Image (cartoon, rainbow, N blue to C red):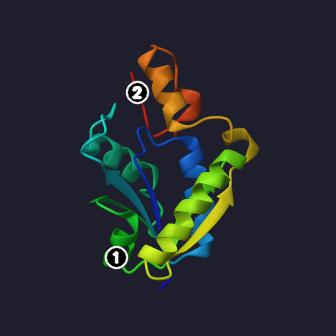
Amino acid sequence: MKTAVFPGSFDPFTKGHEELVKRAIPLFDKIIVAIGINSNKKYLFPLEQRREWIEDVFKDDPSVFVDQYEGLTAHYCQKVKAKYLLRGLRNASDFDYEKTISQLNAIVGGGLETIFLISEPQYSHFSSTIVREIIKGGGDASPFLPKEIQIK
């Protein structure tokens, strides 16, 4: 079984994240959207809310699962027997950062392979960080979020 892990904090999960997972579904038997927990990080949305949102987005996709983890992503992949990491690239800066992380994950994860998908142009200009700022500023973030995620 080809299993991929799509790790992130997903605070919040955006249309860019959704699009990436949907494009990867034909490539893998199972995709785990894995919410990383970092006790040193302050999140805008609680873990339970983020998990529920992602489960709602993929409720009709039987090959997509949602989980959470602490510690190294490579160790989590070993635990769930995933041989692939799924990552999105929006720009050259993302590539430079992700390339280094993927090389380290390959060593720490015993050959863990990172699969990069380039973001569709309509999603390449925003991130969870930007969406959080819109929300914190009282703006309408709905153009950036899957329809299942309603933030008031």
Quadrant of the drawing holding the C terminus: top left
- 3D distance between C-alphas at marks 2 and 1: 32 Å
Which one is nearer the viewer's eye here, 41 or 48?
41
Point out the residue furthest to the right here: 121
Q: Image height check: is 74 above or below 36?
A: below
Q: Which residue, given by chain and number where applicable, does mark 2 sit on?
A: 151
Amino acid under label 1? Val
Q: Residue at x 42, y 19 (%)?
A: 136
Q: Which residue, given by chain and number where applicable, does mark 1 sit on?
A: 80
Q: Residue at x 51, y 75 (%)?
A: 106
Q: Residue at x 29, y 60 (%)?
A: 71
Regarding residue 1, the answer to whether it shows in the image is: yes
Regarding residue 91, the answer to whether it shows in the image is: no
Point out the residue furthest to the top here: 138
User: Tags 2 and 1 in contact by the CB under 8 Å rule?
Assistant: no
Which one is nearer the viewer's eye here, 116 or 74?
74
Residue 14, given in percent of the width and then of the height, sits at 52, 41
Image position of 34 (left or right of 19):
left
**Can you tell which of label 2 and label 1 is closer to the viewer?**
1
Image position of 24 (left or right of 121):
left
Amino acid under label 2? Ile
Secondary structure at numbered mark 2: loop
Residue 129, given in percent of the width and then of the height, sits at 50, 33
Which is nearer the N-term, disc 2 or disc 1? 1
Q: Image height check: is 100 above or below 97?
A: below
Secondary structure at numbered mark 1: loop
Q: Quadrant of residue 144?
A: top right
